[in-house]
Amino acid sequence: MDADTSVIPIAAYLGSWFATLGVVYRISNQIDTVASEELKRFTSHYLQKSDPSSLFTGGFYSIDRVFDVVFGVEHFSRKRVRRSAFATIISFFLIMLVSIFYYRKPLYSILHDDDIHLTFVGPSHALLQLLIYLSINIIIDFFSLLETRLVLRAIMSSKSKVQIFFFISLDLILSYSIFIAFYTLFFVVTSDYLTYYDSLSLTTRLFTETLTSLFTLDNMIVDEILNFPLESAIVFSTFLTSVWIYFHLLSSAILRLKTPTITGLHFFKRAINIKEKPFLSIGVVINVLISIGFLIGLFFVILF
């Protein structure tokens, strides 16, 4: 990063970092408060390996139950719609704060440069443009949440680790597919040079080409995402529920390690109350992993 870089991008990055830690801590602590004693007892035994459940079996059972605690049981209930939208809004703006650091410019400049070429929105209408993208993101994430819920149920019914890994991979593919489907449809419908009859065929073509590029690791897709911060915010927040699952499993695996395996882990496990606060314990480990990721990102952008 250049020496004359403004303090604003760095402050935005640090703000996103600490805000993320605060959100994870608050949610984890709240889950311990509202979760049933049976679920807390199972998760506590699972983390301390008192329960013979394997990492995947016990982990996904815990995640499946926590999912209902956080978002509710009925997918189209007001509770799930409200909490899904709330989670999207938080993740969207946290990612936008990171974008301010990555692109080294204020939010207004990012929105001004990210021209989506709509008939009713120009690049100077930054606030309206932001609200449009946020609204799209809320819709996409809601359906992505439904997809993740169905995949979790399929994993719970799986009979082997091969099936589990298949459904985990399927979750990533479907999450990205949902984004591409909604985004290309939005692009086609709002373009000023396309007729109604062109919309369906072009949406199908863009969807197919984008997925093909993804599986062939075409750099064009990566460049497209990184060069347009609003699009990247939607993409990354779409994977929020999937990333949460992976963080939950990884943190559980760390806590289940025998203490002599890692120096300092014994002290760490004694400092957190796994028996009484199992989900907060998982949240603390997740925050450590998040902090490592933010530090790596900080040094990467500064050095390169």
Image: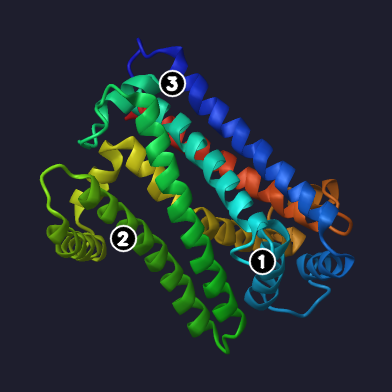
**x%, y% of residue 251?**
65, 57
**x%, y% of residue 111?**
33, 27
* Type of the residue with mark 1: Ile
How many labels, in total? 3
For the point 15% across and 64% down, which residue is it? 201
Q: Nearer the viewer, mark 2 or mark 3?
A: 2
* Type of the residue with mark 2: Ala
Tell me the distance, in whole angstroms, between the alpha carbons under discs 2 and 3.
Answer: 32 Å
Tell me the distance, in whole angstroms, between the alpha carbons under discs 1 and 2.
Answer: 27 Å
Neighbour class for label 1 at 10 Å: few (<14), some, many (≥20)? some
**x%, y% of residue 28?**
73, 50
For the point 48% across and 54% down, which residue is it? 141
Looking at the image, tell me whether mark 1 or mark 2 is earlier in sequence order: 1
**Residue 52 visible here:** yes
| 207 in relation to 22, above or below | below
Quadrant holding the C terminus: top left
Query: Toward which corner of the image does residue 302 lie, by quadrant?
Result: top left
| Mark 1 element type | helix
Q: Which residue is mark 2?
A: 181
| Mark 3 element type | helix
For the point 77% across and 80% down, which residue is it? 52
For the point 59% across and 64% down, which residue is it? 76
Q: Which mark is residue 135?
A: none
| 134 in relation to 238, above or below | above
Tell me the distance, in whole angstroms, between the alpha carbons under discs 1 and 3.
Answer: 35 Å
* Type of the residue with mark 3: Pro
Q: Which residue is mark 1?
A: 63
Q: Which residue is mark 3?
A: 9
| Mark 2 element type | helix
